[in-house]
Image (spheres, rainbow, N blue to C red):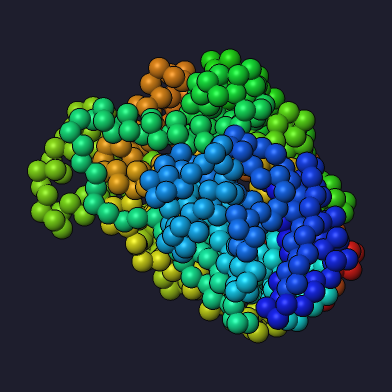
Amino acid sequence: MSGFAGVVSLDGALPDTHLLERMAQTLAFRGPDGTHITTKPGAGFCFTFLRTGPAPQCPSQPCSLDGNVWLLGDVRLDGRDDLRRKLEQHGDVFPSAPTDEELVLRAWRRWGHDCLPDLMGDFSFLLWNDEARRLLCVRDLMGARPFFYAPAGGWFSFSNTLEVLLLVPQVSPALDSLFIADFLLQELCSDPDRSVYREIRRLPAGHKLEYASDQVRISRYVSLPIGEPLRLKRPKEYIERFQTLLDHAVRDRLPREPSAIFLSGGLDSTSVASVATKIAPQTAGSATLRAYTMECQPLFDDEEGRYASLAAQNLNMPIEILSAASCLPYEGWDEPRWRTPEPCHDPFLRLRRLQYQQIRTHARVALSGYGGDDILTGQAWPYLVYLLRRSHFGTIARELGRFLLTHGHIPPLRGGFRARLRRWFRQTDALMDYPPWLASQFAEEQHLRERWLELQKTPKPMHPFHPEGYSGLADNFWSSVFDQDDAAWTGVPVELRAPLLDQRVLRYLLQLPPVPWCADKELLRLAMHGLLPEEIRSRPKTPLIGDAVSILAASGKWSPALLPAPCRAARTFVDWERLGATLRRTIDSNLWVCLRAASLNYWLKGIENAGAIR
């Protein structure tokens, strides 16, 4: 994805050109196809361009229609033909194929803020009104593209790359203790606007930021809808409509150049691959679609490689398989080039980066099967309760009866009964799993026991019949996942795209009756009939059989006792002696939790060695 950064001053001060040059140099890894720096009174912008497609892109930014409102950012739109037709109906004339950036500028000129909910795709961008001295920053609904900002010293600094903002002299690199606390407690900060640095914020997914008169205002501009279940006349209509939407989602993301797909042995990524191989000859000519897979053989009996190879062979797609067993936990983490923008709890980070480096030799765009589990493994119980409360007894009898006749069993209820029983039996000790190795002073200052209890609470359901799926899509989980697949984390300019998280697909899925369509991915299985090998299409959802870290520790091939000593900053957050005692007697799933402290220590040591910590 292209890189962008800049600074604006509402009083018209001249930006520091040397700072912009340093920003552009730091962003160079994102955009090998061109670098542009623009300065004007009160604003300075830099842009590094990555050509991806399939739609035309603006290679030089910021860009403008009228010389007053300027767009800077990373924009890839879905449904661009629909947006163009809507603009043409209101009088816009397009002499040639417009870029996505031009479509955004035209929509903004035509409808202002009202256009934002209609923008679909992967984007983070800003609009700077030169005359009015107003700034608008926008991030897409799912958070596929990052956006960071820091108001400091009379300047508003911004970028899609966190570390660029550390170049701004007025921005302090002091760490955010609450972010680190959440990382140690659950690996993910629950506050979507925080970053690991106290003075650098991230714009949450689906939100806009307005900066004017030295005031920053942030508000949500788009959300996933909540409505009534969709009722169609024939079952085949549900399948056909989904197939059409998935085709559109893949087509809008598939470039005309060679591209890649992360392929597992599961149903989600193989379904995306199946649609992509059908569409590619229509849009990309002879461009190659290549699969990339990771497997853990012979560490444990991992069949992902076999199933992925079966799918690739069936789709006539070349495949490259990376052995995860060849890497030990934290291998290479002492090297400065492995340092991530924020703390990362992936002991096998080296493997992920090696896989992205493999892809980079072939493609700039990689498709993913992300998103299939949220709604398509839906819950029958909330849906049945929803129907009962509305006295829809006939619908209950008809849909349950049809499912029972077809499958020979009732649909999975997934009512959370086991979790409630566990909570009931353990209600006398809600702190049972609270990490005992947190530094006592840090825990007291940040009230971490209270924070732990707060994080254990189940949020109130927002969707009446897709509660878990909607919650998983509405919180900041997916934006965090996308952040860690961003080029700033992988080190290579490869853009990840997830068709199953397309807004059109999600809006449709959230209308589906969970019975039968979301019971064990029934809709996806029926939609892929005849397109995937039956062995994959009918394969049940299979969790990873083994925990590679625990297996390596139990076998003696790797030991947490070999982890490096803590740096000075790590002792602020972790009682290292107590952590060591816990690690010596832990080789089960609790080992993963304890290793969060080790992951943090590696990250802190890296920025301490780089002189970027206070």
When the figure is inspected, residue 423 is found, relative to residue 428, above or below; the finding is above
- The number of numbered discs placed on residues in the rendered structure image is 0
Q: Residue 488's spot in the image, x, y percent?
A: 74, 52
Quadrant location of the C terminus in the rendered image: bottom right
Q: Give the residue displayed 56% in from the left and 72% down from the top.
A: 210
Residue at (27, 37) in percent of width and height: 516
**Quadrant of residue 462 in the image?**
bottom left
Residue 420 pos. (x, y %): 36, 61
Residue sitting at x 62%, y 64%: 68
Q: Is residue 370 above or below residue 489?
A: above
| Front-most of residues 221 and 489 | 221
Q: Position of residue 477 (x, y in %)?
A: 53, 56
Q: Nearer the viewer, residue 560 or 273?
A: 273
Instruction: Point out residue 274 in the picture as x, y percentages from the top left corner.
Output: 50, 24
From what the image shows, is residue 64 above or below residue 31? below
Q: Is residue 464 above or below residue 167?
A: above
Tell me: 113 left or right of 169.
Answer: left
Using the rendered view, name the quadrant where residue 547 is placed: top right
The residue located at (86%, 61%) in the rendering is 22
**Residue 548 appears in view:** no
Residue 153 visible? The answer is yes
